[in-house]
Image (cartoon, rainbow, N blue to C red):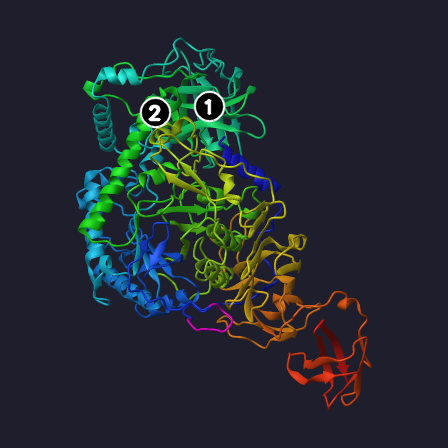
């Protein structure tokens, strides 16, 4: 059983979240094409795009000599090519929401009609679609007019065809990932696509994209990595359980042997470098691994979950060796691999010792399987494993692992077969201490037959052989990036920063980006999981958890743990906590807060819109990733974009600097047991919660890694502006001009500090407060409060707490109402709160007077005010109070009082006064000595403000 599914099951059994539809809802629909300017929303001026984006020596993006940060979004498929009637409104609304960068993604996809792709979908990908190219050009012109930049993606989901001249193109999986980095023909096709896209003249600007400063940056290949696919054992041919064609495997074999010939020159030198290690036969730890007892139940068992059905038996039919083999007959599968496990429990391991598991297996037809070693008791520690495809022929498989703990008799050797029905056979299952192999029998450099080893078997080989394998893949990947970068800049004239790929797997990826201009990464929290059919519209689920409830804040240590290279900008070009996760809004303060602290230079949320065609206007949230109709998220966009772009949250002024040597990188496989999608750091990456880490270089004589220890919760960033409290599930951001509390607001009254305190909260949500002037919140005349929680469609149907299948419901959306009580510290003698409508226009406001000098208690129940935005206007100033002033017993009488009567003041002689109605309008003001004569004041409730140099007092007065 894999560790991730086990943890998932445990979480499901323990969680208490209620994901069903909420009832305290109200409508708040943000218009699709609104671009109006409002007094109480941040203003994003139209940036003049006249100069190309560059990078500075200290690692920032630069525009016209000034640093620039990007708050961006992705557009995919048909949304990249809006109709000319929609494009101006889309661009203008983006600017209003604080978006200044659009990442154009999946423009080369194969699954839409020709309306949603740059290709004609006619069996070839060698020429561009003139209709969608024209729409793209028009849209780029509209974005440029609004001051919004473009991030152009080249190779994303292009699926090569035989019409392109690619042999067996329909057998190249996953958009050619991995092989596009070394197949010469595919690289040539990528260059020709780039030439067509970047050099075609835009008739609406008169410039090709390569010469247009609207392009801010360029990505060569999306989520592609050769080294990462090696880590996942994907670089063998299909027949050997890998994921590439035989010809691509042959190409890698040839390049590998050429690499070794160039490095070592002779067989003798190679033998010296790869000398064999352990000699002798280690103790066998698997009992009856050849099944020769004929009684399989003595040492082996079958573990079944859910509705799975399977049996095991010792079979005398065609064993690999001896008289028997094991037969697993799966008669009913759930589609989840670990729901059926053929296993043995009982072996022991020593901590830090390395073991190798070997076995032979086949199946009645090609089928997926997994194999692993783990602890057979809580906490179900995963030791290592492998996976791939079984074929109809016996084949040997193996993996090695270094035991992270001592385990006496509780090691489980397991084979997962729960994805589909059918029969599989196993034989000669073995586990023993690893023997380090240098050259295998018959391997000869002169014959060019040195085998490329799988990552899962690396620990069974001499460390230098493994280091050479790592160096080979890294160099091949680096050569691809270097070649593409040179082509784009030298031949096509690209003038803006270029990166290679993203969804990085650790520090080895930035190493391959040495000649490139910036580093990019991706991350998702609770990405939907499709247990049976990829991207099934019905069969999916989400873990539906708050990242603020994770001990070390989920995605943050991975993306901010130390991938940033000193002197190069860092972007996160895909990020989301996909819908319908009920805690989704917390992603904005998390990414903006920690991204600012770590000096990130750009974010691109995935996605703003997509589709074939893209729907821009229907008020419905009916997919995982779309944000443009997601009201709570979009309502927070202007505040967090402003805070990020303006640098309101401090960057760590003293980042930790680490450095690596090439030898260190090439030897990382000895310690790196993470998979392709997991970032590996040679230190505790949770340091990201308190300190920033930068890579100083990869060419040091020896590695310098002096990263401090991670403290305990709550985690306070080095700037003291971010505090993450996992036990309370809260994140607070406190800066002079911007503050935020996110998470379980019912726990917020336990927090202190800052100019905003939540005295009473309820649901999970985000409360953010932004100064709209250059003044701190305490003295700002205008500011904006935003309260956001959840969104839902009409008649959404939840199945438990983890899925809605395809029952997304219908429009319009509605948002969950929060009911909070805030204490705001503002140096004013009164404030007016304006609920804002969906375009940001003020509604009738209400006035509040301080309960103490400069302290305003604000009760906001969104059910009453039907808004996510509240403008705050401050009047007058508070100069402070003398010690003991508020200890005085000051009272006014009579109260109630006649509209033409006198008000007497006890305990205070001589002061300025102002009588205001409940809307904050002054009806009478002046200076009094002992009493105040009312001058025909109408009946009603009023505020009487008494102000002296020592302090101010506010009393309610009823006039009859």
Q: Position of residue 322 (x, y in %)?
A: 39, 11
Please state the extent of the stretch shown in magenta in the rendering: 35-42
| Identity of the residue drawn at 41% across and 46% down | 522
Q: Position of residue 161 (x, y in %)?
A: 22, 45
Residue 916 in the image: above or below residue 457: below
Q: In the picture provided, is 741 more to the left or to the right than 616? A: right
Q: Depth check: give the residue in front, 681 or 13.
A: 681
Q: In the picture provided, is 793 more to the left or to the right than 891? A: left
- The quadrant of the picture occupied by the C terminus is bottom right
Mark 2 falls on what kind of element?
Answer: helix
Magenta segment's dominant SS is loop
Q: Position of residue 918 (x, y in %)?
A: 67, 78
Q: Position of residue 803 (x, y in %)?
A: 51, 49
In this view of the protein, can residue 868 be seen by the observer?
Answer: no
Mark-to-mark CA distance, 1 and 2: 15 Å
Residue 552 in the image: above or below residue 605: above
Q: Can residue 885 be found in the magenta stretch?
A: no
Quarter of the rendering containing residue 335: top left
Q: Depth check: give the residue in front, 581 or 73.
A: 73
Q: Residues within 10 Å of mark 2 (few under 14, many from 20)?
A: many
Q: Earlier in the sequence, mark 1 or mark 2?
A: 1
The tag on residue 402 is 1
Q: Depth check: give the residue in front, 153 or 371.
A: 153
Q: Can residue 41 be found in the magenta stretch?
A: yes
**Disc 1 vs disc 2: Cβ atoms closer than 8 Å?**
no
In this view of the protein, can residue 642 be seen by the observer?
Answer: yes
Number of residue marks: 2
Q: Residues within 10 Å of mark 1 (few under 14, many from 20)?
A: many
The tag on residue 466 is 2
Residue 423 in the image: above or below residue 45: above
Quarter of the rendering containing residue 438: top left
Mark 1 falls on what kind of element?
Answer: strand
């Amino acid at each position: 059983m894999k560790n991730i599914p086990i943890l998932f099951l445990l979480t499901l059994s323990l969680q208490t979240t209620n994901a069903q539809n909420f009832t305290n809802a109200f409508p708040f629909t943000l218009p699709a094409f609104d671009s109006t300017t409002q007094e109480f929303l941040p203003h994003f001026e139209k940036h003049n795009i006249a100069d190309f984006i560059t990078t500075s020596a200290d690692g920032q993006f630069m525009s016209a000599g000034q640093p620039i940060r990007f708050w961006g979004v992705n557009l995919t498929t048909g949304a990249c090519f809006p109709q000319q009637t929609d494009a101006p409104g889309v661009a203008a609304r983006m600017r209003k929401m604080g978006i200044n960068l659009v990442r154009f993604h999946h423009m080369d996809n194969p699954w839409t009609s020709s309306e949603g792709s740059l290709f004609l979908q006619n069996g070839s990908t060698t020429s561009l679609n003139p209709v969608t190219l024209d729409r793209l050009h028009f849209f780029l012109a509209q974005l440029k007019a609004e001051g919004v930049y473009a991030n152009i993606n080249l190779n994303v989901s292009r699926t090569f065809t035989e019409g392109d001249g690619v042999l067996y193109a329909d057998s190249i999986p996953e958009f050619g990932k991995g092989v596009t980095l070394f197949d010469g023909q595919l690289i040539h096709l990528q260059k020709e696509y780039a030439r067509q896209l970047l050099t075609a003249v835009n008739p609406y600007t008169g410039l090709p994209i390569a010469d247009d400063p609207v392009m801010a940056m360029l990505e060569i290949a999306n989520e592609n990595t050769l080294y990462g696919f090696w880590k996942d054992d994907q670089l063998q041919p299909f027949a050997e359980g890998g994921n590439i064609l035989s010809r691509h495997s042959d190409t890698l074999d040839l390049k590998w042997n050429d690499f070794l010939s160039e490095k070592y020159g002779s067989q003798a030198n190679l033998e010296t470098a790869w000398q064999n290690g352990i000699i002798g036969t280690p103790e066998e730890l698997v009992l009856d691994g050849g099944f020769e007892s004929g009684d399989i139940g003595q040492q082996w068992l079958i573990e079944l979950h859910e509705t799975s059905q399977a049996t095991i038996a010792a079979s005398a039919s065609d064993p690999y060796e001896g008289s028997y083999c094991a037969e697993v007959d799966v008669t009913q599968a759930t589609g989840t691999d670990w729901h059926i496990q053929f296993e043995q429990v009982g072996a022991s391991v020593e901590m830090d010792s390395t073991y190798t598991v070997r076995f032979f297996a086949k199946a009645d037809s090609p089928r997926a399987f997994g194999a692993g070693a783990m602890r057979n008791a809580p906490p179900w520690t995963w030791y290592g494993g492998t996976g791939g495809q079984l074929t109809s022929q016996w084949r040997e498989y193996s993996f090695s692992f270094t035991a992270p703990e001592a385990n006496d008799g509780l090691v489980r050797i397991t084979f997962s077969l729960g994805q589909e029905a059918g029969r599989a056979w196993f034989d000669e299952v073995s586990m023993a201490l690893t023997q380090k192999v240098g050259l295998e029998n018959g391997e000869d450099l002169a014959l060019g037959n040195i085998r490329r080893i799988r990552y899962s078997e690396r620990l069974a080989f001499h460390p230098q052989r493994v280091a050479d394998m790592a160096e080979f893949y890294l160099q091949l990947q680096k050569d691809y990036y270097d070649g593409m970068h040179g082509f784009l800049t030298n031949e096509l004239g690209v003038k803006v920063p270029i990166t290679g790929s993203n969804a990085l797997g650790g520090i080895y990826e930035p190493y391959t980006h040495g000649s490139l201009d910036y580093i990019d990464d991706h991350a998702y929290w609770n990405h939907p999981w499709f247990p049976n059919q990829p991207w099934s519209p019905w069969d999916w689920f989400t873990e539906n958890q708050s990242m603020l409830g994770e001990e070390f804040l989920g995605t943050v240590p991975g993306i901010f743990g130390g991938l940033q290279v000193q002197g190069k900008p860092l972007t996160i070009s895909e990020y989301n906590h996909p819908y319908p996760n009920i805690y989704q809004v917390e992603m904005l303060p998390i990414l903006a807060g920690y991204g600012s602290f770590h000096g990130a230079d750009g974010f691109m949320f995935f996605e703003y819109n997509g589709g074939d065609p893209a729907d821009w206007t229907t008020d419905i949230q009916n997919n995982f990733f779309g944000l443009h109709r997601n009201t709570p998220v979009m309502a927070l966009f202007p505040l967090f974009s402003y805070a990020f772009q303006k640098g309101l949250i401090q960057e760590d002024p003293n980042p930790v600097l680490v450095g690596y040597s090439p030898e260190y990188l090439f030897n990382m496989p000895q310690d790196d047991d993470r998979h392709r999608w997991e970032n590996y750091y040679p230190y505790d990456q949770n340091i990201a919660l308190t300190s920033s880490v930068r890579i100083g270089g990869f060419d040091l004589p020896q590695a310098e890694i002096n990263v401090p220890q991670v403290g305990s919760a709550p985690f306070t960033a080095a700037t003291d502006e971010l505090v993450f409290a996992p036990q309370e599930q809260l994140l607070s951001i406190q800066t002079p001009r911007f503050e935020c509390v996110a998470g379980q607001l019912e726990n917020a009254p336990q927090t202190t500090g800052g100019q905003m305190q939540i005295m009473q909260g309820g649901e999970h949500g985000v409360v953010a407060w932004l100064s709209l002037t250059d003044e701190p919140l305490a003295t700002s005349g205008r500011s904006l409060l935003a309260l956001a929680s959840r969104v839902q469609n009409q008649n959404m149907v939840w199945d438990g707490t983890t899925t809605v299948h395809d029952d997304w419901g219908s429009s319009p959306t509605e948002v969950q109402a929060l009911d909070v009580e805030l204490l705001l510290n503002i140096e004013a003698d009164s404030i007016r709160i304006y609920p804002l409508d969906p375009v940001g226009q003020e509604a009738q406001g209400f006035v509040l007077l301080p309960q103490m000098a400069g302290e305003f208690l604000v009760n906001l129940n969104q059910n009453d005010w039907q808004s996510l935005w509240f403008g705050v206007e401050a009047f007058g100033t508070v100069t402070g109070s003398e010690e003991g002033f508020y200890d005085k017993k000051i009272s006014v009488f009579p109260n109630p009082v006649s509209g033409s009567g006198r008000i007497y003041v006890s305990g205070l002689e001589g002061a300025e006064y102002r009588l205001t109605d409940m809307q904050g309008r002054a009806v009478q003001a002046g200076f009094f000595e002992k009493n105040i004569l009312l001058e025909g004041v109408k009946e009603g409730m009023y505020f009487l403000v008494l102000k002296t140099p020592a302090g101010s007092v506010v009393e309610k007065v009823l006039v009859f």
